[in-house]
Image: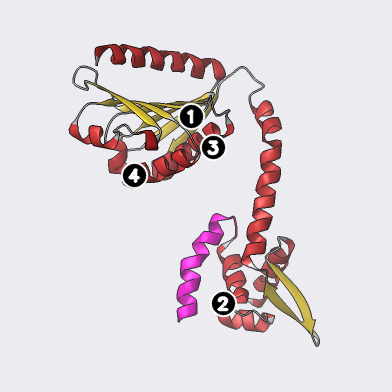
Amino acid sequence: MLFLVMIKNLVQYFTDLGLKEEDAKIYLACLNKPNGLFVHELVKQTNIKRSTIDLILNRLAKNGFVSRHKEGARWVYCAEPPERIAFTFKEKLQNFEDILPVLLTQMTSEQLPVVRFFEGKSGLEQIYDDILLTCGMNDIHQNELLIISSGQDLVKILPSHGRNFIRKRVKRGIKAKILAPDNNITRQLYKNGTELLRNTLFFDNRKYPFNVEINIYGNKIALLNLQSANINGTIIQNEAIASSMRSIFMMLWLFHQKTV
């Protein structure tokens, strides 16, 4: 029973890495038996068909998740150590990061803006991941994030987002300037602090109602519609548009600094 509970809790992590659910179950079953398992034992433990298990084992072996050796006339399948798999993923990620400049050159070779659309809470998370990735790739002096906030809407939709995003942003050394509506909640949410790498100015939302969130970062702009019944966001990637929006933000920033 304990093994079945463990399988249920861990499978999601492996599916996030791109494995199918049945692949993850086979790997975890092997991992639970350091000396390995015969195919018939895997069938018994996982209730997966023998023919399907053969296909899964071939796929897992090809991708470095399991290895095999013979005992008599039969094959025994063993899980590769998790730390070895983690090392392999890190190596693949490093190789991919090495070619990122070339890929980005291909992506931005056209003059037309690149526009991507996102829906729902998962879509918002993807946008914020893109913000961290893009800012992290820029030069330390060019990775500042500029935000015009709609206030507490994001907190209602993603309650834990603020803490998680701030932690990741600070860890990457990404500074932020924020223009936010002036009320008690936003004063607490966006309070200044050198440890948060954040500087905030507040505007009168009664005079200047603002119902979307704008993020300006690198050569991109992210527009988040947080009040619609269908939560959605858009990323526009274009150097000229992002540069112009950055100039507009700084004009607003300087204006509010003078009026504070």
Q: Nearer the viewer, mark 4 or mark 2?
A: 4
| Residue at x 58%, y 28% (from the top left corner) | 139
Residue 169, image x and y in percent? 45, 38
State which tag comes first along the sequence, 4 or 2. 2
Q: Are marks 3 and 2 in contact (CB under 8 Å)?
A: no
State which tag comes first along the sequence, 1 or 2. 2
Numbered label attached to residue 46: 2
Within 10 Å of the Cα at label 4, are there few (<14), some (14-19), or many (20+) other Cα atoms?
few
Q: Nearer the viewer, mark 1 or mark 2?
A: 1
Residue that mark 4 sits on: 158
State which tag comes first along the sequence, 1 or 3. 3
* Callout 1: SS: strand
Instruction: Give me the C-alpha separation between circle 4 and circle 2.
Output: 36 Å
Magenta residues, as a range? Answer: 1-19
* Callout 2: SS: helix
Residue 18, image x and y in percent? 59, 55
Question: Which quadrant, please, contains the N terminus?
Answer: bottom left
Instruction: Give me the C-alpha separation between circle 1 and circle 3.
Output: 13 Å
Amino acid on which the number 4 mark rests in the picture: Leu
Q: Is residue 142 above or below residue 27?
A: above
Residue toward you, 84 or 26: 84
Residue that mark 3 sits on: 133
* Callout 4: SS: loop
Question: Which quadrant, please, contains the C terminus?
Answer: top left
Residue that mark 1 sits on: 235
Q: Are marks 4 and 1 in contact (CB under 8 Å)?
A: no
Image side of residue 245 versus residue 240, left or right: left
Residue toward you, 259 or 89: 259
Amino acid on which the number 3 mark rests in the picture: Leu
* Callout 3: SS: helix
